[in-house]
Amino acid sequence: MTWLGTILPFRRSCINGRVLYCERFGAQMSNSMESGKEHDAPVASLALERIVRSPAALVENLPIGVYTCDANGQIVQFNRRAVELWGRPPRNARFCGAHRKRERDGSEISPEDLPVAIVLRTGKPVRDREMVLERENGESIAILVNADPIFDDSGALVGAVDCFQDISELTRIRRQVSEGRRVSRYVMEALPTAVYTTDAEGRLLYYNKAAEELWGFKPSIGETQWCGSWKLFQADGTPMAHEDCPMAIALREKRAMVGPEAMAERPDGTRVPFMPHPTPIFDSDGQMIGAVNMLIDLSEQKRANEQQRGLIDELNHRVKNTLATIQSLAAQTMRGSTVPDSRAFEARLLTLSRVHDQLSRHSWEWADFAVIAKQTFTPLRGSANNGVRLDGGEVRLRPKSALAVAMVLRELAANAERHGALSTPAGSLALSWRVAGGKLAIDWREQGGPPVSLPNKRGFGTRLLERSIAEELKGVAQIDYAAEGVHCTMEIPLPG
Amino acid sequence: MMSDTPGEQRFLDGKRVLIVEDEAIISFMLEDMFAELGALQVDHAASIAAAMSCLNGLTPDLAVLDVNLGGDRVYPVADALEAKGVKFLFTTGYGRGGIEPAWTHKLVVQKPFNVEQMTTALRELLGLD
C-alpha cells in the first residue's frame, strides 16, 4: 500500500500530493473498477484487490520511474523503479534522485535546468526530455522524462511529479540506425560516380557530390523530379523530356534498367554523355518507396575512343604518306635511266627507314644529327668506308629537317662513292658540323678523289637540296664542284 | 619519258599548276607527273603561308592540295582557291573520312596514287570526260 519511499513525517503535504498524483494515475483505474462493478467481475485475490483498489500500489509496480517533489523540489515520494534507475534511494535529493544528470551530449545539467525545477518554476509540464543519468558506480542510462505540476484545490502550485523511463536500448538502436545512415551517406558522398535517390513519385531525396558535378548545379531536393540534369538529350542529340528519362521509366514500370545512354547539358552549356542505371527500391512489404540512379560519366571513355581513332587515323596517314614517298623515291631513282638501279633505290629506302628509327626512338619529336651523319656511311653491304672523318656533337633536329638532311647526305655520299673522294683509296672526306646562331652549319669536304666535273644533269640530290633545305626548311645550301673535291655547305635553322 | 606521253594525254598543255605538298619527295613525283601531262608551269608550296603567297602572284589554272601540311590543315588555301574560282583536288593519306565535312564534295585522291589515278581525277576535275 505504501510507496517504497516513505518520506519524513513533517512533509505532510505529501499526502495531498499523493492524492493528486493518484488521481492522475488512478483515473483509468477507477474507470475500470467501475466497469468491473458494472460487469460484476469477481476479484481474483485479496492481494490483487489491494493493488486494484490502491492506485499507489499500481504506481509502485509501474515499470517506469515515478517520483513526486514538493514545491521546493524535495523528493517526497518515489517508486521502486525510480530507485532502480537511479541506482540508489534519493536521500535528500532535490529535483532528481540520480547521482549525476547529463544532457545527451554529455554536459552536466545544472539543478535549475532539471525537468522538475523547470516545472516548479514555470508551472508548465515538461514533455519528452531526453537525459542521461549517471550512477555512483559510473554506469549511465539514457532516460526519457515527462514532468507535470501538481496544484492544490485552490490552484496553488504545490509540487511536481516526474515520470522517467530507461530508453538506453532505444537510444543505442537509434544511434546504430543513424550511424548506418551516416556511413551509407558517407559512402555515397565518397563514390566517384554520380548517385541520386528519389521517392516513389521521382522527387529528388538525395544526390552526391559527383552528381552535382555531373549536373553542373544543385537541383532542389523534394521538388526536382526524375533527374537533376539541367537539360537532357538522347545520345543522338535530340531533346529528351525529364518525364521520359530512364529513371522515370524505371519508376513507372517498377523495374531496374541499364541505359539507354543519354546526355546531360549543364547550365554553362557543356554536355556530359552518361549511362544511367535506375533501380527502384522496395520496402519489406514489396511497396516501391523510391529509386536510386547511378550515372556513369562516359566523357572520359569517349575521349579515349576519340583519341584512339585519332591515333589510328594518324598512323594510317603516316603509312600512306610513307608509301607515297617510297613510290616517289622509286620513280626518282628510275627517272631518266633505262636500267633500274635497285641498289640506289635500296640505299634511299634504307636511309628513310633509319631516320624513322631514330625519330620513333624519340617519340617522333627529334633525331640526333650526329647519328644521322654516322649512319650515312654505315654500309649497306661490304666493308666500311675508310677515309671518312666526322666531327661534331649531338644536335637535335625536328622530324622534317632530320629526314631532309639524311636524304641529302645520302645523295652526297652516293655521289662520292661513285665518282668522288670515296671512289679511290687516296680520297678522304671530312664531315663537320656545329651549332651557331640558332642554326646547324654542316660542312662536307671531299679531297684526294678523281678530278671533279660539273654534273651534266640535275639529279635527285640537287633537287632535294633545293626543295628540302632551301625551300622547305628555309636553310641555305651550296655545292661547289671544285676540282680538288666537292665542297658542300648547309645551314639548317633549328627550332628556337 | 616526257616524249613517250601520247598527245591526248598531254591535256594540261599550257596550264599553270600549283602543288601544295609538304613532303619534298612526294612533290617531285607530282611535279614530274604534271610535266608529263604537259603543264606549262608547276609551282610548289610546302606550307599554307607559301601557298598563299603563290596565289598573290599569277593565278594557277588548277591546284592539288595535300590535306595535312605538317599538322596544319590546308583548308585556308582551299577557301582562297574557291574564292578565285580555281579548280582543285585534295590528296591525302587519310582517305575521304579525313576531310572536313564542308569539303567532302571535292575530288580526293588517296595516297599513294599513280599517274593513271591522278590523270583520271584531273580529267574529272577539268570536265574532260
Image (cartoon, rainbow, N blue to C red):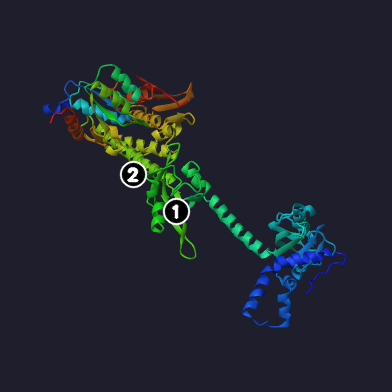
For the residue carrying disc 1, how many other residues have a C-alpha within 10 Å: few (<14), some (14-19), or many (20+)?
some
Residue pointed to by mark 2: A236
Disc 2 with disc 1 on a shared chain: yes
Q: Is residue A183 above or below residue A215?
A: below
Residue pointed to by mark 1: A201
Q: Is residue B66 left or right of residue A442?
A: left
User: To which quarter of the image does residue A153 belong?
Assistant: bottom right
Q: Secondary structure at mark 1?
A: loop
Q: Earlier in the sequence, mark 2 or mark 1?
A: 1
Q: What residue is drawn where x is 46% and y is 64%?
A: A286
- Cα–Cα span, label 2 and label 1: 28 Å
Q: What residue is drawn where x is 19% and y is 21%?
A: B15
Return the x and y of residue A99 as percentages of the image width and height. Answer: 80, 61
Closest to the observer: A21 or A457?
A21
Residue A108 seen in the figure: no
For the image, the number of numbered tags is 2
Name the amino acid, label 1: Glu
The answer to whether marks 2 and 1 mark residues whose Cβ atoms lie closer than 8 Å is no
Closest to the observer: A34 or A417?
A34
Name the amino acid, label 2: Asp
Closest to the observer: A32 or A346?
A32
Q: Residue furthest right?
A: A10
Return the x and y of residue A323 as percentages of the image width and height. Answer: 29, 38
Return the x and y of residue A183 as percentages of the image width and height. Answer: 58, 56
User: To which quarter of the image does residue A405 belong?
Assistant: top left
Please state the chain letter of the residue tagged with numbered disc 1 in the rendered image. A
User: To which quarter of the image does residue A59 belong?
Assistant: bottom right
Return the x and y of residue A398 as percentages of the image width and height. Answer: 42, 31
Q: Secondary structure at mark 2?
A: loop
Closest to the observer: B80 or A240?
A240
